[in-house]
Image: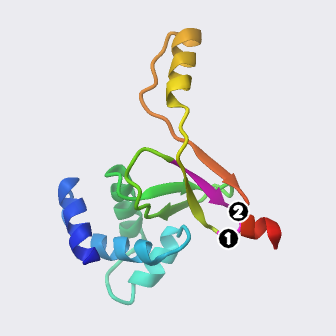
Amino acid sequence: MADRIYLNELKNQKLKATPKRLAILKVLSAATVYLGPQEVWEQLKKDFKKLGLPTVYRNLEELVDAGLVSRIIHPNRRLYYFLCENHQHHHHFICVQCGKVQDIGFCAQDQLQKEVAHLHGGKILSHTLQVNGLCRSCLNS
């Protein structure tokens, strides 16, 4: 069932549904925390004998560009990835200790646009907001 959903999502984004892309989406969908490219590669290399880490990076970035996967920029300056089922515009709260990713429904884009237009005479074309911290479980442990 999940494979069919991923096939449709890739098709809708005009991406080929290659076995490697489908496998990456499957690995990310099974994860409860964000994963690094190396972790994804480690899980996939047993199924794909000729799979290099650069291929995993490239496919992850293509999936991010298509809006199917979220890129997490960790304070350690490494990139991580998370499959978010919420396809509406939203942002994420990232626990930097356990790796849990939670949706934040609030977005201040309208207020930011007014501020940028008023103070700078500009227009926002896109924005990225990621909130890093400690989740309730990590705070209490």
Identify the residue at horizontal 39%, vertical 56% (top origin). 61
Q: Which residues are magenta?
A: 91-98
Residue 53 against residue 109 in the figure, above or below: below
Left or right for 49, reference 18: right
Amino acid bearing label 1: Cys
| Residue closest to the far bottom | 46
| Residue 28, position as x, y percentages in the image | 43, 72
Residue 93 forms part of the magenta stretch: yes
Q: Which mark is residue 135?
A: 2
Image quadrant holding the C terminus, namely bottom right
Q: CA distance from mark 2 to mark 1?
A: 8 Å
Amino acid bearing label 2: Cys
Left or right for 13, reference 23: left
Label 1 sits on residue: 98
Dot 2 or dot 1: first in sequence order is 1
Secondary structure under the numbered disc 2 in the rendered image? loop
Q: Main secondary structure of the magenta part?
A: strand
